[in-house]
């Protein structure tokens, strides 16, 4: 069933309504997890493993338990043998039997004060048998490698992962005949690329607060991107029925994938259960770096061929991913990266293969872009290289090859809407791309522009909405989607208001609550506006249907002769006779029919893989989503003395189908750009052997207002047929092309090619000095 | 557990430090409290110098020399008109430390006491031939900053001694410049260069490439009069490279630092010669 | 309890007494003891700026300031700036500009921005970007925050003109 509204939006959709909760945020009254307190609440501290790989032989917690203020201690012995995980259930609530990375939580303490908890944590004695560690995917695949997960074969897996030894998963996608295609190519480029791990650094560190009631039922507040994933993970790992745990969320200080799957929630719940008291656990910034998750480092080998006209003929992509100690979202990232490795182009022969290998490091997982920025860094540079070899303009070669509406994406999914051409036109025009318009470099610098394009999905899995008409005709909306600051509460309220032709102020949005909200997989995969928006539109339409039935009886007019009017009124067509929602809802509440409640749920169910055109092995997402598109041009300046690169200006156009709230879309584009710029130029988590050496904001740098450019955000709208009012996702696409566009601009400025992200001053200076490839 | 005490005179502060060997002086607290929060230090007391009036202010002395009080925050140094000509680089360095808010907190006394090899003040003060005014149980002494900086994070400060000020020679008229490469604005330097014109020569100090700023006085003398000779400049840069003892860290590799020294020094010399 | 003492602090114009750890930071005392939670702990190292508050009218990091060193000094948090005209102008422009996303950096950002606007007659985009560089935001990319400050400056100067005209 389609849930799109083809009525022209006007009441609420398309307006840059300020976010509903902004006033509480600008007055400092918004409450985040660390702002919550409960009577009798204890504070928690965590003991991390000193080894990257070791067997736990025994614990002695007696001294810690006797320390001042300590109320309870938990170790691996206190948690059941339950394992959680989005794709492969391989992770305990707390290390049990073995530790798999340095810093992995092995024990936790709850005490009256945070100071007491932190002081006592070092009194816990753990006896380990150290094991040899695996510190790279190559080491992990070696025949005699130490094995991290001895029982990997027995773990529950939600897809055909092909797990074996330290191989967590593998995916292979093929279309056409790549090996036979190279002979038909006039140009072939082939290279290896590498990207380093990026930390999410949401300004709010992860945290949780858990409380057990007299019946033994748990209430859990936490910083999250999905109260439902929190519930599932805690219940799986601690083996409690889902009905015995209620998961809630305060305001969330942003999430970029780091708060989607569990962080500290299972440990916090275990401590609350052990002590019978409310327990709050807030990670330090250092712990947030060390024990949550990060963007995967990629090793990519890519080969692309085209004919003499620059038409792409074949691409072969092979990737090797460091998984870290637990699978987490990694199999999804691998599969998705491979799916996106061809970019938004028609390439008749394509192959993408990859392996994901367990190592004794922090788990890598979901991070805005989900593997797409890494493969785009390789792929979009190769498009430029081919253009260079053929003497084509980089924009021209992209126009020649781009996918069109109705085309199939690599392995099968159909593209229904596609504004890519308009995105390219828009950034070309806005940036003055044509030669001659390049402003001169300041003395001592070199300057150049680069382009990259991208596509991203929005979709995946289940979602729902409940819309209730209150007695006075105003509306209560409940979706279970966590607003992480990006404004989904506002956008969903706008969709609901539009569908009912009400001012947006007349719609309240419930905070997600697993007790009362319909299921929502999560705020991830650029999906809330598109999938939850569809559910909201469907539920609102159900409310409207019921209201129309009431009105029909009240006005003694057939439903076909009624219409919805601005302000939430149902009127007789062509007449002044109408009824406000309040009258209708009053009747429903007190006289006839019962309160008006509409609900709508859906699961994204269009298949990713078309077996008629391709072969897919180990595909983690059988039903993926619809496609958004984007194009980015950057103007960069390189300091000839140091190699430091500055983005002078950026133009980013994104096709979001329909901008429900244009300003919020623009901020997604701008924020995504800057996060991508940090990834491209200097952000990198650095390990010395097993130890993360820069787990602090002193040592790990993110972009500041002073080194970021003005970003021109451009919205393109090519409506998605089944999106709510035509909308599709905007959350990640703005980040994807950033490293690639900067690399292409660098090449224009100084020659050579960047092979590694981040493009640090050191690497760029080498590229400049060699006048060729960077180290 | 530490206690905070706030003496109102230098004598009182020193007496307290003498009586409490586990106490530590605290100026802006910007580094000290960060270290405490990271559980890197322990102290019985933090002896705040914030209420000692005599440590405030920047003044020009009768002989033209300039004294910066130990408690002068980076914000004030960055805005001080007395620091002109070949002392102007000190303003530039102060203005590039951290950010607007931390510059309200951090002080020159604290920064010099902390002696982070990547700190911005060190190369400009070494380049300016500054002297560190140290006051302790034995009274006051002035030490050339090059003698004061002993090793990685090690200074000539004795127990219960505090940095009470920085003494600068009278400002010369030649231009000066501070060049800093940092990953992002407000980060500590990957490499930094202070350079001041001095007659027909230059004084140059390089930061973040060893335990203390690199300075090559003999090579400076050799370069005098030959600032427009690229070969002479290159030889001068090589002399500085030879003194360097950089490390690999998250801000850059040792090798990169060695590559940068001649490039940044040559650029700084160009800055102060205005393209001779 | 050992290691605790009573601090007499002047916060948002009121004398407050708190019984806290003797080496507690101002941020801890504000949040835990005084329930003034606009200032946030983002890093506890002075880098992120989410805990920025005013000490004797000057912006400092709450996490790098020891409460014990603040006795007799005037502490002002975002809560205490509720009636401050510059802060109010900034709050209004932040609400509409899109400069507020997750909101975790917002309190500190506003305190720093207020200081800039109070000290600088007409800050340029470059001035604003420099002044805010010690307040990290991971959501917005800063474009709309800079815009909000620019718009607030315009609104304030407009308001000044209006007041002047009304007086004349
Ligand atoms: C976020 C951030 C970014 C920074 N970025 C930079 C940067 O880019 N460049 C840079 O150079 N610095 C930087 N710093 C450091 C900053 O300049 C510090 O303020 C400075 O190094 C220490 O000054 P302070 O007055 O705060 O000293 P404190 O923190 O009070 O003290 C530092 C140390 O010196 C001791 N001490 C303090 N005063 C005295 C004294 N008078 N005599 C003897 N010992 C004393 C203390 O016991 C302590 O060990 C940064 C700091 C922060 C928090």
Image: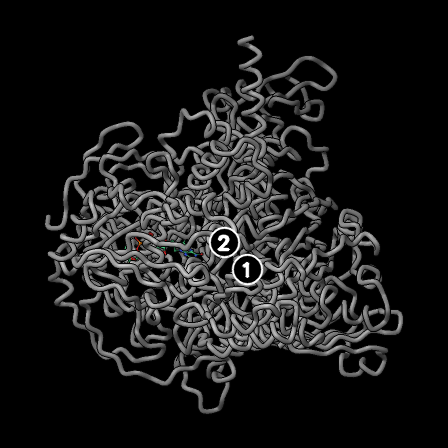
Q: Taking C133 as reference, is B118 above or below it?
A: below
Residue C44 in the image: above or below residue A619: above
Residue displayed at 46% across by 25% down: C85
The residue at label 2 has a CB less than 8 Å from ligand 1? no
Q: Which mark is residue A434?
A: none
Q: Residue A183: horizontal and vertical position, in percent?
A: 84, 83
> Which circle's residue, 1 or 2, is located before the other in the chain?
2
Q: Nearer the viewer, residue A728 or A655?
A: A655
Instruction: Name the outermost residue toward the right.
Output: A309
User: Going 52% across and 71% down the picture, which residue do you hit?
Assistant: B221
Lateral position of residue C87 relative to residue A765, left or right: left
* SS of the residue under disc 1: strand
- Callout 1 touching callout 2 (CB < 8 Å): yes
**Disc 2 residue crowd, few under 14, some 14–19, many 20+, Cα 10 Å:** some
Q: Is residue C65 left or right of residue A295?
A: left
Q: Does residue C79 appear in the picture of this structure?
A: yes
Quarter in which the C terminus of chain B is drawn: bottom right
Q: Which residue occupies the foreground of this view, A164 or A98?
A: A98
* Mark 1 belongs to chain: B
Using the rendered image of the protein, determine whether residue A760 is visible from the camera's viewpoint: no
Q: Which residue is mark 2?
A: B172
User: Mark 1 sits on what residue?
Assistant: B197
Residue A206 on image: x %, y %:
39, 54
């Amino acid at each position: 069933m389609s849930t799109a509204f083809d009525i022209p939006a006007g009441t609420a959709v398309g307006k840059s309504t300020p976010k509903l909760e902004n006033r509480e945020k600008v007055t400092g009254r918004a409450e985040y997890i660390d702002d919550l307190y409960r009577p009798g609440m204890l504070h928690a501290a965590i003991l991390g493993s000193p080894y990257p790989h070791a067997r736990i032989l025994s614990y002695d917690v007696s001294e810690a338990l006797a320390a001042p203020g300590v109320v309870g201690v938990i170790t691996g012995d206190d948690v059941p043998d339950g394992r959680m995980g989005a794709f492969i259930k391989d992770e305990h609530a707390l290390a049990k039997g073995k530790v798999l990375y340095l810093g992995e939580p092995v024990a936790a303490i709850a005490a009256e004060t945070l100071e007491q908890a932190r002081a006592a944590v070092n009194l816990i004695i753990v006896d380990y048998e150290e094991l040899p560690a695996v510190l790279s995917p190559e080491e992990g695949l070696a025949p005699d490698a130490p094995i991290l997960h001895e029982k990997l074969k027995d773990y529950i897996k939600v897809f055909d992962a092909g797990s074996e030894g330290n191989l967590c998963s593998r995916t292979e996608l093929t279309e056409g005949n790549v090996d036979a295609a190279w002979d038909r190519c006039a140009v072939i480029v082939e290279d290896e690329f590498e990207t380093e791990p990026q930390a999410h650094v949401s300004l709010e560190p992860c945290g949780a607060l858990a409380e057990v009631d007299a019946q033994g039922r748990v209430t859990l507040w936490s910083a999250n991107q999905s109260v439902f994933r929190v519930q599932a993970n805690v219940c799986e790992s601690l083996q409690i029925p889902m009905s015995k745990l209620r998961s809630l969320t305060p305001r969330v200080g942003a999430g970029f994938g780091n708060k989607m799957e569990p962080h500290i929630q299972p440990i916090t719940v275990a401590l609350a259960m052990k002590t019978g008291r409310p327990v709050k656990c807030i990670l330090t910034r250092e712990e947030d770096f060390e024990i949550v998750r990060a963007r995967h480092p990629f090793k990519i080998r890519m080969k692309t061929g085209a004919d003499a006209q620059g038409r792409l003929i074949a691409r072969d992509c092979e990737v090797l991913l460091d998984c870290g100690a637990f699978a987490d979202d990694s199999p999804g990232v691998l599969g998705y990266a491979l799916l996106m490795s061809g970019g938004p182009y028609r390439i008749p022969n394509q192959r993408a293969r990859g392996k994901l290998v367990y190592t004794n490091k922090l788990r890598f997982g979901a991070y805005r872009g989900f593997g797409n920025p890494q493969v785009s860094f390789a792929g979009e540079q190769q498009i430029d290289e081919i253009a260079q070899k053929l003497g084509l303009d980089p924009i021209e070669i992209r126009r020649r090859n781009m996918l069109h509406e109705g085309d199939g994406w690599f392995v099968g999914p159909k593209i229904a809407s596609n504004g890519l051409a308009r995105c390219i036109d828009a950034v070309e025009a806005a940036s003055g791309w044509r030669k001659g318009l390049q402003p001169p470099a300041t003395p001592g610098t070199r300057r150049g522009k680069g382009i990259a394009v991208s596509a991203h999905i929005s979709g995946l899995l289940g979602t729902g909405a409940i819309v209730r008409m209150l007695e006075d005709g105003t509306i209560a909306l409940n979706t279970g989607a966590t607003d992480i600051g990006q404004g989904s509460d506002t956008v969903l309220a706008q969709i609901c208001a539009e569908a009912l032709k009400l001012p947006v102020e007349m719609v309240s949005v419930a905070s997600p609550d697993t007790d009362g909200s319909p299921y929502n997989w999560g705020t991830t995969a650029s999906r809330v506006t598109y999938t939850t928006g569809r559910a909201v539109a469907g539920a609102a339409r159900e409310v409207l249907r019921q209201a129309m039935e009431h009105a029909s009886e009240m006005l003694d007019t057939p439903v076909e002769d009624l219409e919805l009017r601005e302000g939430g009124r149902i009127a007789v067509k062509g007449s002044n006779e109408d009824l406000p929602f309040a009258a209708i809802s009053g009747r429903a509440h007190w006289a006839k029919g019962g309160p008006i409640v509409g609900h709508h749920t859906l699961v994204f169910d269009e298949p990713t893989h078309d077996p008629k055109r391709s072969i897919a092995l180990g595909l983690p997402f059988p039903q993926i989503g619809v496609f958004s598109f984007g194009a980015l041009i950057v103007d960069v300046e390189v300091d000839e003395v140091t190699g430091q690169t500055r983005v002078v200006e950026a133009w980013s156009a994104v096709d979001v189908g329909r901008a429900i709230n244009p300003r919020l879309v623009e901020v997604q584009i701008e924020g995504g750009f800057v996060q991508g710029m940090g990834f491209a130029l200097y952000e990198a988590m650095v390990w010395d052997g097993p130890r993360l050496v820069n787990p602090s904001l002193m040592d790990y740098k993110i972009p500041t207002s002073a080194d970021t450019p003005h970003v021109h955000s451009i919205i393109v709208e090519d409506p998605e047929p089944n999106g709510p009012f035509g909308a599709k996702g905007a959350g990640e696409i703005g980040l994807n092309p950033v490293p690639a566009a900067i690399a292409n601009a660098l090449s224009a400025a100084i020659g050579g090619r960047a092979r590694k992200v981040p493009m640090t001053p050191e690497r760029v200076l080498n590229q400049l000095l060699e006048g060729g490839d960077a180290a | 557990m530490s206690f905070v005490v706030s003496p109102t005179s230098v004598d009182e502060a020193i007496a307290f430090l003498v009586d409490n060997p586990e106490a530590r002086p605290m100026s802006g607290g910007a580094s000290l409290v960060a270290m405490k929060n990271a559980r890197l230090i322990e102290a019985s007391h933090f002896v705040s110098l914030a209420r000692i009036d005599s440590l405030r202010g920047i003044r020009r002395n009768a002989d033209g020399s300039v004294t910066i009080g130990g408690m002068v925050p980076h914000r004030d140094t960055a805005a001080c008109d007395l620091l002109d000509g070949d002392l102007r680089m000190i303003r530039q360095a102060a203005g590039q430390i951290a950010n607007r808010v931390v510059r309200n907190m951090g002080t020159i006394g604290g920064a010099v006491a902390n002696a982070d090899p990547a700190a911005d003040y060190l190369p400009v003060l070494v380049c300016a031939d500054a002297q560190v005014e140290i006051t302790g149980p034995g009274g006051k002494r002035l030490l050339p900053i090059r003698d004061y900086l002993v090793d990685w994070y090690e200074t000539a400060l004795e127990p219960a001694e505090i940095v009470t000020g920085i003494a600068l020679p009278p400002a010369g008229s030649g231009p000066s410049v501070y060049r800093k490469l940092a990953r992002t604005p407000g980060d500590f330097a990957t490499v930094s260069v202070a350079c001041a014109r001095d007659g027909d020569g230059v004084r140059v100090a390089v930061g973040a490439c060893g335990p203390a700023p690199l300075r090559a006085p003999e090579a400076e003398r050799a370069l005098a009069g030959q600032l427009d000779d690229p070969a002479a400049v290159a030889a001068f840069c090589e002399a500085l490279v030879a003194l360097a003892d950089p490390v690999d860290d998250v801000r850059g590799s040792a090798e990169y630092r060695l590559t940068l020294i001649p490039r940044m020094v040559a650029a700084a010399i160009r800055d102060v010669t205005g393209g001779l | 309890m050992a290691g605790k003492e009573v601090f007499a602090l002047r916060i948002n114009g009121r004398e407050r007494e708190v019984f806290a750890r003797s080496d507690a930071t101002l941020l801890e005392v504000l949040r835990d003891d005084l329930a003034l939670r606009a200032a946030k702990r983002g890093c506890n190292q002075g880098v992120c700026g989410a805990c920025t508050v005013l000490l004797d009218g000057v912006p400092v990091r709450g996490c790098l300031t020891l409460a014990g060193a603040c006795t007799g000094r005037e502490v002002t948090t975002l809560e205490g700036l509720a009636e401050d005209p510059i802060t109010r102008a900034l709050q209004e422009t932040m609400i509409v500009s899109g400069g507020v996303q997750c909101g975790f950096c917002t309190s500190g950002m506003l305190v720093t921005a207020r200081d800039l606007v109070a000290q600088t007659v007409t800050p340029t985009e470059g001035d604003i970007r420099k002044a805010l560089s010690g307040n990290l935001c991971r959501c917005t990319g800063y474009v709309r925050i800079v815009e909000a400050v620019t718009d607030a400056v315009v609104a304030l100067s407009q308001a000044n003109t209006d007041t002047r005209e009304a007086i004349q």
